[in-house]
Amino acid sequence: MTETVDSTRFGELEVPGEALIDFPEGMIGVGGRRYALLEREESGAFRWLQETGDPDLALPVTDPFQFFPDYEVVLADEEAARIGVTDPAAAQVLVVVRADEDPGQVSANLLAPILVAAGVGHQVMNEASWAPLREPLLSGGRARACSDAA
């Protein structure tokens, strides 16, 4: 079943049911509890979470593993139990992208990834030792961070 979603960025969209994600606790720092995951380019690295009830609210997201192959999501037992995801590998992982006119300043929020399983999403706090709030996407930040620690 599809749902019509209005977006100031993309216009009126017909969204398939499997692209709809419910966020029972919402998203950190923004409103909304139901989003559509939109792919604007089939082979593109970036997608959008468009809030279904707020045409103005759309967040760019990406699969962090495309940019940071060694990235990991570590959850406290209490957090895993709260969201019902005991194995982060069993969920789709997305991170919010912070856009900037300067491509060198485009960054990903690796500290608060989004886990999606069975149409339900949760933004969680990552307890991995390397999970910055704003990691540049285009500078090879993970390699730099590892070499700085050596």
Image (cartoon, helix red, strand yellow):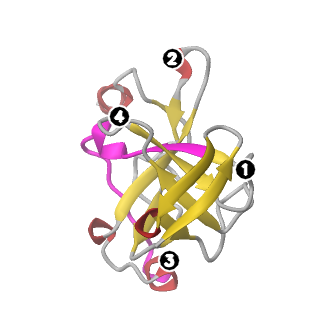
Q: From the image, tell me which residue sits under label 1.
A: 55
Are there few (<14), some (14-19), or many (20+) residues within 10 Å of tag 1?
A: some
Quadrant including the C terminus: top left
Dots 4 and 2: beta carbons under 8 Å?
no
Q: CA distance from mark 4 to mark 2?
A: 16 Å
Q: CA distance from mark 4 to mark 1?
A: 22 Å
Q: Residue at x 29, y 39 (%)?
A: 66
Dots 1 and 2: beta carbons under 8 Å?
no
The region drawn magenta spans 59-78
Q: Which amino acid is tagged 1? A: Pro
Q: Secondary structure at mark 2?
A: helix
Q: Residue at x 74, y 46 (%)?
A: 56
Which one is nearer the viewer's eye here, 86 or 2? Answer: 2
Looking at the image, residue 106 lies above or below residue 64: above
Q: Secondary structure at mark 1?
A: loop
Q: Which amino acid is tagged 3? A: Glu
Are there few (<14), some (14-19), or many (20+) residues within 10 Å of tag 3?
A: some
Q: Which amino acid is tagged 2? A: Pro
Q: From the image, tell me which residue sits under label 3.
A: 79
Are there few (<14), some (14-19), or many (20+) residues within 10 Å of tag 2?
A: few
Which of the 4 image quadrants contains residue 5?
bottom right
Whether the magenta-drawn stretch holds residue 69 is answered as: yes
Label 3 vs 4, first from the N-terminus = 4
Q: Nearer the viewer, mark 3 or mark 4?
A: 4
Label 1 vs 3, first from the N-terminus = 1
Q: From the image, tell me which residue sits under label 2.
A: 103
Q: Secondary structure at mark 4?
A: loop
Looking at the image, residue 31 lies above or below residue 147: below
